[in-house]
Amino acid sequence: MATMPTRIDGDLFEAAKAAGQVHSRSAAQQLDHWARIGRELEASPSVTHDAIERVLTGRAAYDEVDDRSQAVVRAGWEQAIADRIAGLDLTDRLDASGASWAEADEDGAVVVRGGDAAAG
């Protein structure tokens, strides 16, 4: 994904920074999230923020909202999944286990790390 420099109002940036901390996102990631949600909301006047928030917080079922609201909910879920994946780093936990594990390097070759593999 390409990024473009842009000017953001200071208050909006601070609000994104605060909201991002709650959701484990950087200010830039939070602004991107808000932009995606806003794009979907503007595309459909029938979508209400309250209905989407109820589904995203588990207070309402996905099937209870209309198709356009479901699209916004899916965008929220996709962003949440991307954020969680970006924040995953199990290296410390794997190292602490003492076991070895395999992963692909940048070229796709299998590399064994940790445990006895690190010594040999």
Image (spheres, rainbow, N blue to C red):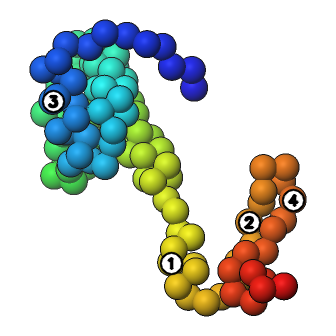
Kindly state the secondary structure of the residue where label 1 is placed: helix
Question: Depth check: 98 or 103 in front?
Answer: 98
Residue sitting at 13 percent across and 33 percent down? 50
Count of residue discs: 4
Q: Which residue is mark 2?
A: 103
- Residue type indicated by callout 3: Ala
Q: Which quadrant of the rendered structure holds the N terminus?
A: top right
| Pointer 4 or 1: first along the chain | 1
The label on residue 15 is 3
User: Sequence-wise, which precedes: disc 3 or disc 1?
Assistant: 3
Q: Amino acid at mark 2?
A: Glu
Q: Are marks 4 and 1 in contact (CB under 8 Å)?
A: no
Q: Residues within 10 Å of mark 1 (few under 14, many from 20)?
A: few
Q: Position of residue 104 (x, y in %)?
A: 77, 60
Q: For mark 1, what is the residue?
A: 93
How many other residues sit within 10 Å of disc 4, few (<14), some (14-19) or many (≥20)? few
- Element type at mark 4: loop
Q: Secondary structure at mark 3?
A: helix
**Label 2 neighbour load within 10 Å: few <14, some 14-19, many 20+:** few
**Type of residue at label 4?**
Ala
Query: Distance between the Cα atoms at labels 1 and 2?
Result: 15 Å
Q: To which quarter of the image does residue 30 belong?
A: top left
Q: Quadrant of residue 99?
A: bottom right
Q: Sequence order check: which comes first, mark 3 or mark 2?
A: 3
